[in-house]
Amino acid sequence: MQAGGHSVTDDDAFDFVARVDEHKTLDSLLTDLREQASRFGFEHLILTGVPVGGQRLEPLVALNGWPEGWFERYVANDYARHDAVCVHAAQSFRPFAWSEVPRQLLERPACRRIHGEATEFGLLSGYVVTMSSEHHWNTAVSFGSPEDGLVIDKRDRARLSLMATYAGAHAEDILGFSNQPRVLTDREAEVLTHFAVGRTAGMIAELLSISERTVVQHSENFRRKLGVKSTVHAVAVAIKRRLIMP
Amino acid sequence: MIEAHVFSYGQRHLYADEWDEWLRLRHQVYIEEKRWHEPNADRRETDQFDNDAATYILGLLDGKVVTSARLIPCNRPTLVSDVFPHFCERGGVPDRPDWIEWTRTLTVPELRSGGRQSILTQLCAAVMEYCLLEGAAKVGGIQELFFLPKWKHLGWTTTPLGLPQEIEGSGDCVVAFMDVNETALANIRSAMGTDRSLLHHRGERPR
């Protein structure tokens, strides 16, 4: 039993993992995950691709269980840019409590304002689980609680992290990302990776034993596919979307 | 596409150059990058699980080692059974010969791109192909929780054998095993856009 009177067992976590694939819709997955999270004291959650490089949050969201009104306000004001929890989620390979986000991020005035507003919506403390994504920079589940300073112990953290990871992977599956055709061909990705580490078209042509004209053709193709005008922009977009990892 | 060369520990003489190249890569990745152990004077990494129980897959591209896997049946001593048994609180420590422990997968830094046709995906396809040929039921081992969703993205199912726990220097890890079946192989091949075998042998196919 936790301080707040919550109680979760290992069975709850492993049962969730075992049944998660049965959810055919995002709504039923959200309902299930929410019910589990509430037993830890977390009433709200969002499962989303983590926005980076000025991406907007809204199109990245898979499960929205945030308080009524908060999501709309967060998106309308583009809080993702300044919310330290969101910024840290892009950088962390490990789950973390909101209170564990580095101080220098948390104490920026814009962030303090956002967190102040969040308390009005019943979001006082929380826990984030990040995971690799096929489609986004990475994916995160952020759980929020109306309890100030809710602490969950190591074992509960492990249970919640495991459930969140399986939920995140399955949400992408429901969204059908796995079946989407790939964006770049291997060769386009290869050429773009060489550009990303500072090589010129001439150097790339020599390295790959192809003509410079072919390199230029590949560049035109990946710029068109990514909807950008310059190779620099293509590099930025491709890194963000994890199409290349130079 | 890589050539995934399969050989047993006893056959490593057939791959003398590649074997040595790989041990040096292991030293670079596991000791110099990840700092799992103190550096070795000869700058090669081996451990107690490099023995007669092990089968290796080395992914070669233009003759160079670019990726790898070490596979050990779970009725023999494994990293999970000997070092991380406490990660198997739920499922018990695997001990069946048709469960295969998968360790020592690295990719050379210049080919660590993500994506579904990556060198890593090709290696995963080779591992699944090998496991099917061996009649294995499961393949897996200790891994980072953060990257667990990648199996799902490849169309594989995984079962955790315990809760995640922190390993100093490696973040939160979990012991999980993937189902070995034709569907898993078909799914990863369709993700890669190929249906041909990646496995190669020099000499006898290892048993």
Image: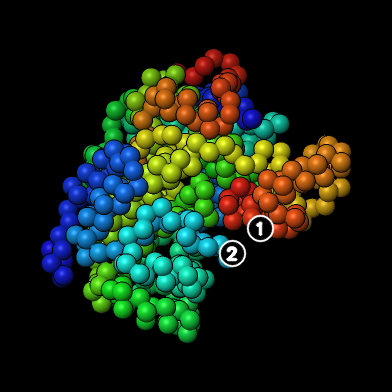
**Residue shown at 43% from the left, 70% from the top:** A74
A10 shown above or below B176: below
Q: Mark 1 highlights which residue? A: A236
Percent position of residue A40, x then y: 21, 62
Residues under labels 1 and 2: Cα distance? 8 Å
**Residue shown at 37% from the left, 81% from the top:** A116
Along the polypeptide, which appears first: circle 1 or circle 2?
2
Q: Are marks 1 and 2 in contact (CB under 8 Å)?
A: yes
Q: Which mark is residue A53?
A: 2
B148 shown above or below A137: above
Nearer the observer, A222 or B35:
A222
Residue reaching furthest to the top: B204
A27 shown above or below A7: above
Residue B143 visible at all: no
Q: Is residue B21 left or right of residue B155?
A: right
Kindly identify which chain the residue marked by label 1 belongs to.
A
**Which quarter of the picture shows residue A46?**
bottom left
Q: Amino acid at mark 2?
A: Gly
Q: Which mark is residue B31?
A: none
**Residue shown at 42% from the left, 78% from the top:** A114
Nearer the observer, B64 or A210:
A210
Kindly identify which chain the residue marked by label 2 belongs to.
A
Q: Residues within 10 Å of mark 1 (few under 14, many from 20)?
A: some
Q: Amino acid at mark 1?
A: Ala
SS class, disc 1: helix
B98 shown above or below A191: above
Percent position of residue A152, x then y: 24, 66
Q: How is the image coloured?
A: rainbow
Residue reaching furthest to the bottom: A109
Q: Is residue A47 left or right of residue B130?
A: left
